[in-house]
Amino acid sequence: MKKRKITFSQILVIFIFVVMLGTIIASYALAFHDKNPVEMIAISVITSLATTGIGYYWKSYKEKDSRNEHGLDENGVPFNLHESENEDEEH
């Protein structure tokens, strides 16, 4: 089984999730230590998390949809090239 490469957009989304989760944890840690955290930070960070996730999933969906529409595999190679390679191996 081939190991899949992590794309730049996946790295970016993981980074955004880690930073946002750290921000949420820091906000609640400040509240626990009787500091005065900004209350709207957690709400805006959670909203940003949701929009980042939805945006990434929409991008991935449209990429796959476009590849299927144009007859390409995940590496951008047309399906008919795969079929001709398989026919050559059989003969």
Image (cartoon, grey):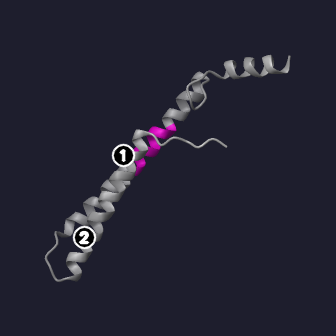
Q: Quick one: 63 or 8, which is closer to the camera?
A: 8
Indicate the quadrant where residue 49 lies: bottom left
- Residue 69 in percent (x, y) is at 58, 25
Please, is residue 5 above or below residue 19 in the view?
above
> Residue at coordinates 26% horizontally, 75% vertically from top-left?
28
**Type of amino acid under label 2:** Ala
What is the chief secondary structure element of the magenta stretch? helix
Left or right: residue 44 versus residue 37 is right
Q: Does the magenta stretch include residue 58?
A: yes
Left or right: residue 69 versus residue 81 is left
Left or right: residue 74 versus residue 38 is right
How packed mark 2 is, by other alpha carbons closer than 10 Å (few <14, some 14-19, many 20 or more), is: some
- How many numbered dots are placed on residues in this image? 2
Residue pointed to by mark 1: 12
- Residue 58 in percent (x, y) is at 45, 42
How packed mark 1 is, by other alpha carbons closer than 10 Å (few <14, some 14-19, many 20 or more), is: few
Secondary structure of the residue carrying tag 1 is: helix
* Quadrant location of the C terminus in the rendered image: top right
Left or right: residue 78 versus residue 58 is right
- Residue 68 in percent (x, y) is at 60, 29
Please, is residue 66 above or below residue 59 in the view?
above
Q: Quick one: 73 or 62, which is closer to the camera?
A: 73
- Residue 23 in percent (x, y) is at 26, 64
> Residue at coordinates 74% horizontally, 17% vertically from top-left?
84
Q: What stretch is highlighted in magenta?
A: 53-61
Residue pointed to by mark 2: 26
